[in-house]
Amino acid sequence: MNLRVAATALPVLVAAVVLTVNAQRGPGASLTLEPFVGVTSNGTVERGLFAVHATGVSTKPVMEAAARFVSALTPDERAGTTFPVDDSEWRRWNNVHRAARAGLAFREMSAGQQARAYDLLAAGLSAKGLEKTRNVMRLNETIAELTNNFTEYGEGLYYLVVFGEPSPTEPWGWQLEGHHLIVNYFVLGDQVVMTPTFMGSEPVVATSGKYAGTQVLQEEQDKGLLLMRALTPDQQRKATLEPGAKTSNRAETQAYRDNARIPYGGTKASDLDGSQRARLMDVVAEYVGNVADGHAKIRMEDVRRHLDDTYFAWIGETSPGSVFYYRIHSPVILIEFDHQTPVALEGPRRPNRQHVHTVVRTPNGNDYGTDLLRLHYERHAHDATHGHVRPPR
């Protein structure tokens, strides 16, 4: 089992100093984390966007699935797979293939543990989100076949971690981490925050091997291009951040970019007509719809409340088959889609359609459910029976 155990366990919330965490990652391995702020437009968090409240959407299925998974672990496995809910382990995910990871890998699980792990994913994700997740994993097997490198690539090299104790009232969560696939899933009561979420692949379509015919992220690609092409020439000019072809990788909120400052830019949704706004929301729904349906609906309602303050930005050409980057950015959601340069596969070192990265964030401090956790601790700060006598360090 590949353990990423912190020498000093400190919480994910804002700390007074930069956290330097030494972990069991091999000789000389270390990781430095800035105090958490969250993705912002200018370095200042906009407060009052998130609240602890009842959604009416049950989290009982995912809670029970997580408890069943944890109960199937041995004591040693549990020690490397479970962390406090406010642990900084949340933030140490990495989308690259060579990263050391915490938790238990699917290929190290027994058949029974694997079944419970997939049950956990199925309980938290929509059917479409689960299929995307499985397809990213399958295409990682395709990379292994194409490169003949089954040490660094493979569908079993994805790790599960559980934070806190699965509970109907107390905060907890889980994380799935591996190459091109990270799902952070925070739960408080019946509220869910499923960001940061990273999905990508190289290739995005398997033309041979065990999973020939498997494909992923085509809807995200095609719907984004259709939206851009539906804009008027003036709107396209406003949306375009840089003229000409896209020549480099542009995603800005991948691993270790929790505090990225990304100014609003592009065409504002308030300047779009009804059909264009519907297309914009359809793109957003393609990403938000990866979470289970009830919670996707809650999330879309939140996005819709801030629609007039939502921006659509673009880099690249707009002809069929072109490569591009787009971003959808509001106070409560940030989505990035990026055609990337090749890494594992051969080809010219310029962006292509066979390597895609996508990221979804909750700006202004609520990635990993951090703002909800802060509010929860504040609400119970003086309740000794609740166990949160003082907020986390």
Image: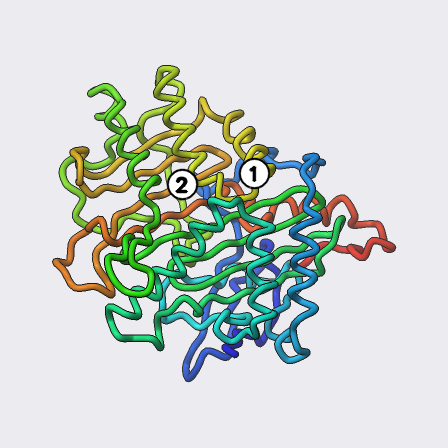
- Residue 15 seen from this side: no
Q: What residue is rendered at 56% in x and 38% in y? A: 293
Which of pointers 1 and 2 lies earlier in the amino acid sequence?
1
* Three-letter code, disc 1: Asp
Q: What residue is rendered at 51% in x and 63% in y? A: 18
Q: Position of residue 298 (x, y in %)?
A: 59, 33
Residue under label 2: 335
Instruction: Kindly identify which numbered label has been placed on residue 370.
Output: none
User: Is 67 placed above or below 259 here?
Assistant: below
Q: Residues within 10 Å of mark 2 (few under 14, many from 20)?
A: many
Mark 1 vs mark 2: in front:
1
Q: Position of residue 52 (x, y in %)?
A: 69, 39
* Three-letter code, disc 2: Ile
Q: Position of residue 253 (x, y in %)?
A: 39, 50
User: Is 240 placed above or below 31 here?
Assistant: above
Residue under label 1: 293
